[in-house]
Amino acid sequence: MAAPAFAEAPDRSPRPEPRPGSVAARKARVATGEGIAALVAAAKLGGGVSIAVIDSATGQMLEGLDETQALPPASCAKAITALYAIDRLGAGFGWVTRVLVTGPVSGGQVQGDLILQGTGDPSLTTDGLGDLAQMLAERGVRGVTGRFLVHAGGLPHLARIDRDQPDHVGYNPAISGLNLNHNRVYFEWKRAGQGYDMTMDARGERFVPRVTMARIRAANRESPLFTYREGNGTDEWTVAATALGKGGSRWLPVRQPEVYAGEVFQTLARAQGIRLPDPRVVTQAPKGSVLVQLASDTLGPVMRDMLKYSTNLTAEVVGLSASGAATLQASGGRMADWLRSRHGVTGRFVDHSGLGGDSRISAADLARALARGRGTGLPGLLKDFGMRDARGQGIKGHPTRVPSKTGTLNFASGLVGYIEPQGGRSLTFAILAADVGRRDRLSTGQREQPEGGQSWTKRARGLQAQLVGRWAGVFA
């Protein structure tokens, strides 16, 4: 009430009621929380939803709904990983892949061992290894008198990112100090007579070397789709023949990336006229002198690609490089400790990619961390989500930028980032939705394409677009 009692006149002039549909009316509805709960209810997501939008400069909470509820961030965790890596490693940090020798080159022969050594480069490709082999040939190397060793001690060897994912999904590969093609191998099949011609290769843009350490055969069954077994230096796969159809292709994860990279380098070296023995993986760092090396991009471009393509391997390598921990859970814990000490917010992280479903953080804490880390240049590394219309389609040429990171896990979806209008005030927001119970009821085999998952994610993304449009129209 504007008056202290019904019988008395007001002690100040009441403001006129805003016209329905005007900016003032929208601000009034937002100020009272009107509308946001209705949008969430209409999305019919179930589970929990945590929403927060704050003023980027002051940190003032402008609107929220269950903003302190901690939910799985999915790949939105990569935005925190980027802040962590930039702070701990510095923008100029990078990785180097080297070829070392234990003796001189004489008559085209290395008088001793040749070592392929990785420090963890998550962006190393077959084409990069091909360039390294060419550099070696330009130094006059044609063979070795000793061994061909592979060393990947720059990071711990971890067989997979998340144990709860199906064996065959390419976004859940092994992690190593020597990573190639995001530790994935290309599986291609074609109908041939009564069976199939199936190949595995490490394709790049310029080189397509065949791979023998990853092997696959068709099995006469309907399910499971794939099975995996680790052999002695080999990844052994089977695939259900009934699912192959006329032909197709997909990336499969590599579980022994050091063996994979060693074989591919041996093949690429042979193409340059260099004969190397079969690779031997060693855990102790051999002593030798660097003959040639290949440097990665610096952290900024690596982070930009990680955030754009949401590459899980890159996120884990970056996080492990920043923490120095031996496991992902320990590394995620160190990132959580850093987040609390640096930005004063609380979160639980079991990895750096968000693939593990046990990570938790609230929308309020995510938004505060991103607002406080805005000066690191993170907005410039994020992909522009853009303004969307009522159907969720991007509005071309809209002057407001929305640099942000999406996150999608089984029945978990998020969007975090910034709303940056021309000449207006910058906002930082976080939108998290998750039906954890529904996710936990899925079997491992259902997690690649769960029933109802696609429509659930579509509704979640529609809600995100509505909220961003709402905030840009009222607060920015």
Image: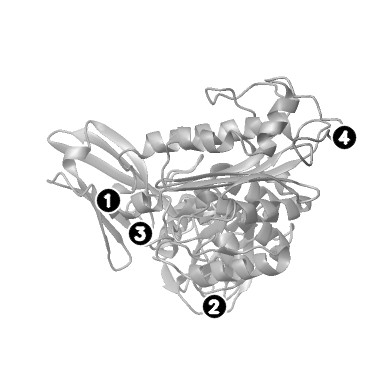
Give whichever of 363, 248 is nearer the camera.
Answer: 363
Image spot of residue 358 (x, y percent): 45, 61
- Place residue 242 in its image quadrant: top left
Residue corresponding to mark 4: 12
Crowding at dot 3, Cα within 10 Å, few <14 / some 14-19 / many 20+, comes out as some
Left or right relative to 344: residue 129:
left
- Distance, label 2 to label 4, CA atoms, is 79 Å
Crowding at dot 2, Cα within 10 Å, few <14 / some 14-19 / many 20+, comes out as few
Q: Does residue 47 show up?
A: yes
Residue corresponding to mark 1: 445
Q: Earlier in the sequence, mark 4 or mark 1?
A: 4
Q: Residue at x 34, y 55 (%)?
A: 440
- Place residue 322 in its image quadrant: bottom right
Image quarter in which the C terminus is found: top right
Q: Tag 3, which secondary structure? A: loop
Give whichever of 100, 27 is nearer the camera.
Answer: 27
Residue corresponding to mark 3: 164
> Do the residues under discs 2 and 4 have CB atoms within 8 angstroms?
no
